[in-house]
Image: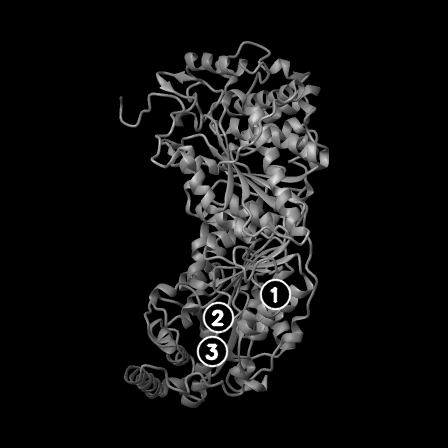
Amino acid sequence: MPSGQIPVSNPPPLPSHLPDNVLDLVAKIEKTALPDNVRDSLRGFQRAACYIAAAMIFLRDNVLLDSELQLDHVKPRLLGHWGTCPGLILVWSHLNLLIRNHDLSMIYVIGPGHGAPAALAALWLEGSLEKFYPGEYDRDATGLHNLITRFSVPGGFPSHINAETPGSIHEGGELGYALSVSFGAVMDRPDLIVTCVVGDGEAETGPTATAWHAIKYLDPRESGAVIPILHVNGFKISERTIFGCMDDKEIACLFTGYGYQVCIVEDLENINDELYAALEWALSEVKKIQQAARSGDPIVKPRWPMIVLRTPKGWGGPKEVDGKIIEGSFHSHQVPLPKANTDESQLNVLKGWLSSYNISQLLTDGKPTQAILDTMPADDKKLGQIKTAYDPYIELKQVKWEDFAVDKAKDESCMKVTGKYLAKVFEENPTTLRLFSPDELESNKLDAILEHTQRNFQWDQYSRANGGRVIETLSEHECQGFMQGYTLTGRTAIFPSYESFLGIVHTMMVQYSKFVKIARDVKWRGDLASINYIETSTWARQEHNGFSHQNPSFIGAVLNLKAEAARVYLPPDANCFLSTVAHCLHSQNKTNLIIGSKQPTAVYLSASEAAEHCRIGASIWPFASSAPDHIDDPDVVLAGIGVEVTFEVVKAAEMLRTVCPALRVRVVNVTDLMILVAESKHPHALSAAQFRKLFTADRPVLFNYHGYATELQGLLFGREGLGRMAVRGYQEEGSTTTPFDMMLVNGVSRFDVARWALEKGAERNEEVRRGLGGYLGDVDGRVDEVRKFIVEHGKDPDDIYNLPERIGDS
């Protein structure tokens, strides 16, 4: 046998050495034969949807096989994934019946998003495509022709589920996130059930492995439920899956350990009877757990139900082609017949395959027969039409951030002040706001939140069943998934994190932002709250944890998003941070990144000044600049972007007033990074006139920036006069050292800023030029003294973080 080839279809797992009695852990459910008419309706839906899904991959004409299938009826490019579709359709048909029988509100989250043909076929059959795309995908012959022929071609539906797919809240292109998104969706929605299919390939991912624990954060008194279905079809793209090679005993032990009751559905001859019984059992277990919690007698550590569904990959497709096993093999993962558009033998196989569904028996004049429709729920309960999935937004009640503002000319922690404000926001919004943190709430000094609300960890007897708004789980992926699901179903969430570890969810954030980007352009989808990251414990003050904790790269990840979504804020002080957080919590459809320090830092602006500064995005700071008459005609402009680097700019200007009083310095602070983007390239971009008003038309400008310099250089590209602009930022230098040494080694200290200002100022100021050597010597002497002190004493000089002079004069 050639390497990698498996000689049988749908091979069973090898038996384990676990004792047989562990199978007692598997749920034993009574299997009741379905009435013939119900079973026929389910089978009719499954056959019709499987036909449509397969046809979408292959056909560009003759979509109902009204004539003999020819090569020119087949698409020139064959795109799509067949292997997962039969299982997804099987589940969809049974969810219809479950919803109809019990009048449920349900969302169906499909982990294998490449199974879009299955979802689209089901949506056409239930009439959801017709509702949202009238005249284009109606339930008639024309609508079906459009659906099939336009799939995976320009202008039609793409190969993966996305925001254009009715009922979807998860794309599933990058695997691993379906389960955590599902749990986030049901939080604070007590009547909602999410059925989540996790493919056995996706189940191998780290984020999914963590997400199985999400039941431990679900309070059945206040939230809905997730019914996970692990779909074990045995294969990934070209190899067997881990779960496909685990026998029932191993499956039972693993998921029982996670905290689930496991029901295994695998009788292919009676699959409809068995799956119907399994779903009825799962729903009854959910109701039992919820009823106990809501009646005041909650079950401690309830065993939530889950289903393991074993069906062959590509079930119902070709058995074997050109000597290769297709059904029950990885060969069915994508396009089982890749030469069907050029090879007559494969075309004949396609013809036989599609004909096996007898589509003419299932459609009348291109419309589904009544028998198929009989098991579908009411329109507003259909999986493609539940409003929670497409227009759910609930705006937060306003809380005046000004009530929490602090006096200027003192040191305050942005995070401590913001924590007090957020505690009040939680109080005013007890069921529509949550915070998801990777075990860092107190470390990030947001613990004032816990004075009003608590953590929500149901497996801990000290935090269970108390209505806590805070979930702390040491998985950034799980926090991100919870936030996505919570936000996509209408609520608002906050994700605070150490700066260096937000990059863990970089691609997950990008995938979500792609979904929302498409959603903004879909006319039938409503607005959503923005997702909100609070990035603190920044590189500038992670000197005690060392180089591994010094990484501001998440800024670049957000900057690369579409301009309509990307928002990066670096408020310079506590009042500006408050203003920014308040704004972001009420913004919509954005990805907000707010960066600040958890350590006490200077407060420069009053509440009213901060509000105006944040509204504009940047301003000149007269109190930090040279003499008033210098501001309008400066020799140099010094701009700070970020808490610590702005402090260094202010202290540099202060030092220069002593070292070289003749140097004319203008100090600018930028709090909204996006204002710097070239005019018309971002909604927040300053006009050329506004940019000149801040930074002059021709004077040298130094941007002392919190992130990587190349990021800011990219933003500025397209602005006039780039040659006069310099950017300093984090240079990937650091260790376990002192806070000020971090400024020095990265070239953003007050001494680096002052030196640049003197050198550039000398180019146009004769008095500065004449004394330049002495001025630079003075600065160099000061920095040498500081470096010597740090080496000798292992700490920064006591006066290094003294409040700037004149800070109260603004």
Secondary element at image label 3: helix
Secondary structure under tag 1 reads loop
State the SS at label 2: loop
Which residue matches tag 1?
453
- Kind of residue indicated by mark 3: Phe
Give coordinates of residue 102: x percent, y percent.
Answer: 69, 35
Viewer-nearest residue: 793 or 102 = 102
Distance CA(mark 3)–CA(mark 1) = 34 Å
Residue at the location (36% across, 87% down)? 775
Considering only order in the chain, which callout, 1 or 3, is on the residue closer to the N terminus? 1
Among numbered discs 2 and 3, the one appearing first in the sequence: 2
The alpha-carbon separation of the residues under discs 2 and 3 comes to 8 Å
Q: Where is residue 419 in the image (x, y as percent from the top left)?
A: 57, 70
Q: Quadrant of residue 563?
A: bottom right
Q: Distance between the residues labelled 2 and 1?
A: 30 Å
- Relative height, residue 518 to residue 532 (above, below): above
Residue indicated by mark 3: 647
Q: Name the residue under label 2.
A: 642
Q: Examine the image and state in which quarter residue 739 appears.
A: bottom left
Indicate which disc, 2 or 1, sits on the residue closer to the N terminus: 1
Residue 69 spot, x, y in % from top left: 52, 12
Number of numbered markers:
3
Q: Nearer the viewer, residue 271 or 413?
A: 271
Residue type beneath disc 1: Thr
Whether residue 160 sits left or right of residue 124 in the image: it is: left
Q: Is residue 51 above or below residue 97?
A: above
Q: In the image, which is nearer the foreground, mark 2 or mark 1?
A: 1
Q: Can residue 619 be seen at all in this image of the molecule? A: yes
